[in-house]
Amino acid sequence: MRDITKIYPNGVVANDDVNFSVERGEIRALVGENGAGKSTLMKILYGLESFTSGAIYLDGQRVDISSPHKAIDLGIGMVHQNFMLVPSFTIAQNVVLGSEPRKGSFMDADAAIRITESLAKEYGLEVEATARIDATPVGMRQRVEILKTLYRGADLLILDEPTAVLTPQETDDLFEAVRRLVNQGKTVIFITHKLVEVKEISDTVTVMRHGKVTGNVATKDVSEVDIARMMVGRDVFLQVDKAPQQRGKAKARVEHLGYISETGRPMLRDVSFNVYEGEILGIAGVEGNGQTELVEVMSGLKPATTGEIYVGDRQVARKNARQVRRAGVGHIPEDRLTNGVALEATIAENLVVDRYYRPPIAHASIMSPRVIRSQSEALMAEFDIRAAGYDAPMDSLSGGNMQKVVLAREFSADPALLIAAQPTRGVDIGASEFIHNQLLAKRDDGKAILLVSADLSEVMNLSDRIAVMYKGKITGVFQNSPDLTEEELGFYMLGIKEQTPEEMAQNM
């Protein structure tokens, strides 16, 4: 890709004279903060976006990639971060979808199965060809997406954050499959934000910042810290400095909690745990195993079906969100755009939305613009929220600054229990470092924090104890120590191992 520039109609320059190349048989990592331009660059290569200027060459020949169909015809495949599979179809049906083998006027189902099994064997991507997608684990769905691209003849595979929802064991399996693909002549571009994976899987690294390439290096010649510095433009501390824990009394107690969804599916099954003052309790698990429902029930967005939740001595299991907040619960939601911020409102309005009706902001139902402004400007300074001013609309902010607004609101409410769900999702390394330090400061200040994250390294870096969820129940509770490994937690995340009630009780 030579001199690629992409300027959107609103004037935003996503790619600024970018040169990017990958050699045949290479695993090239592409890294950068959110908004650095890496996803736009790959969408251009796959035909999802057009570029303003520049040129693309494949095997030395200039090519026009005007659509994904053209990219596929040229042997370029892309596996997206959000899987694009039909849940009610089998794996074989998904693999051949759009290019089905025919028997007369109908799809040849037996041929589809044979094709899938042959590809799976050839590339070491083990799947159950006749299983329905909605009955398969996340790791297998990832393999199905790769098989789809291989079936369509891809020689160059773009993998966009492929390990975001995988366990350590599933990640190891994926890396093994990627190496096998390369050994058979394929080429891989690997987009990730996990620098430890960059070191493990890639041959070379391209780093982007602010729409430009800031480095092309051999992976063996750089450290994770070096890569982070190229991404952010300054030194970044990848390991958190956690003070010894000073644990107090139980601030929150969850007892035999159950939740059945609107479709009648049990999403939480007999969940019990405590969260203590001065503690971060991490919840680990592959996404979709009840973590979202646990957070929604505990924050008052959904009523518990069975069981109890106590914050201090107040029972909140079936209270609404405002009642739960008044009981001393703060909530950093996993989806900030849905539950965290109002995009059309200003920064100030988002900062006071939970307190606008009470002193010192309101007296006799009349709000004070002066107090709102002073509080908002103080919080913007404290949390390094970068914007034109307190009255700037939320939709003018970057993802990292939006998340800082949510943090500023929730932390300044001084909650007894803070529920932090995916607190660094969609934010860059610099903002993640800031958020981690803020969470640890609250923990050191004696607050109880429940951390729910799909990023296992984040859970292990921050937590004092870790509870693992699988299919809506807790399969293990662990004291976080240097002896506890991601691999061991992975067995509990997959449901392969489960502690006895006596073992769990020791760490409750």
Image (cartoon, rainbow, N blue to C red):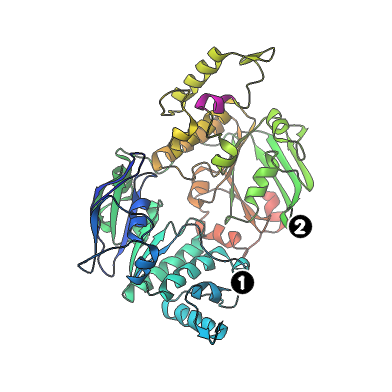
**What's the residue type where badge 1 is placed?**
Arg
Element class at badge 2: loop
The residue that appears at 57% across and 62% down in the rendered structure is: 491
Q: Is residue 348 magenta?
A: yes
The residue that appears at 61% across and 71% down in the rendered structure is: 132
- Nearer the observer, 390 or 165: 390
Q: Which residue is mark 1?
A: 132
Say left or right for 280 vs 8: right
Q: Which residue is mark 2?
A: 264
Magenta: main secondary structure? helix
Q: Residue furthest front?
A: 105
* Magenta highlight range: 346-352
**What's the residue type where badge 2 is placed?**
Gly
- Residue 59 rendering spot, x and y as whole percentages: 23, 69
Say left or right for 35 vs 207: right
Q: Residue furthest bottom?
A: 104
